[in-house]
Amino acid sequence: MRILVVEDDADLLAGLSQTLRESGYAVDQADEGNSALALAKAGSYDAIILDIMLPHLNGREILRQLRHTRSTPVLFLTACDTIDDRVEGLDLGADDYLVKPFDLAELLARVRAMIRRHHDVRDPVIRMGDLAIDTNARVVSKDGVPIELTAREYALVELLAMKRGGLVTRTFIYDHLFDDNHDSMSNLVDVYISRIRSKLGKDFVKTRRGEGYFVGN
């Protein structure tokens, strides 16, 4: 899944982005309000982590403007910790609110929960035949036996599972799983599809030539 992180503290921005990437997310970054709003409006994000106190345009105004056109899940991550601050943020349309300092495990759990709600996935374990995709533990099991996947391979399996029953294009996969740190070679998606087929079975993902990929229910 692709996440936009907006934070003006350079160290926190770098550390949080690295943690998310190590968890298998594609990450874009912004350290001030104007560029953050432009990215949020133009990009296809599964979640946005948004500071409130930002240069040029604060997080509340970013969310206010974003909600005119986008329903992207937004988590306010901020030092503004009064009840009034939280109420205002949630009333503006934020999906969650976390106060600094925070625990990384809690932040990741809240992001996972937001993404599940956005994709209308109610059970954290997605079951597909003999496969179980645990979106909390980020583990895929077949007949109860865990399958070893890299973070990126897991992310692709989770994305396809959340979109099961529908066509998923190569462009959609690339936009949601790969950030600017990855080589944009044309067969990158094919490489990862081949890897997960070798681990989960060749029939897990079906190809519709010239259209994209399909995973059944």
Image (cartoon, rainbow, N blue to C red):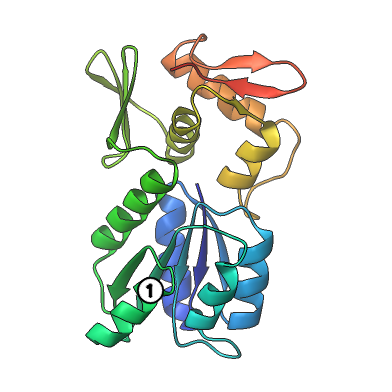
**Toward the viewer: 195 or 104?**
104
Q: What x and y, as percent, mark residue 104?
A: 28, 63
Q: What x and y, as percent, mark residue 152?
A: 48, 39
**Toward the viewer: 134 or 15?**
134
Q: What x and y, as percent, mark residue 11?
A: 44, 78
Residue 215 higher or lower than 103, as above or below: above
Residue at horizontal 62 percent and vertical 54 percent from the top:
181
Which residue in the structure is indicated by mark 1? 91
As helix, strand or loop, the secondary structure at mark 1 comes to helix
Classify residue 184 as left or right of residue 94: right
Q: Residues within 10 Å of mark 1 (few under 14, many from 20)?
A: few
Residue 81 can be seen in this image = no
Classify residue 153 as left or right of residue 86: right
Classify residue 81 as left or right of residue 34: left
Residue at horizontal 51 percent and vertical 9 percent from the top:
203
Residue 178 higher or lower than 186, as above or below: below
Looking at the rendering, which quadrant does residue 82 occupy? bottom left
Amino acid carrying mark 1 in the image? Asp
Query: Which quadrant is the C terminus positioned in?
Result: top left
Looking at the rendering, which quadrant does residue 73 occupy? bottom left
Residue at horizontal 25 percent and vertical 12 percent from the top:
143
Residue 184 can be seen in this image = yes
Q: What x and y, as percent, mark residue 25?
A: 48, 50
Q: Residue furthest bottom?
A: 56
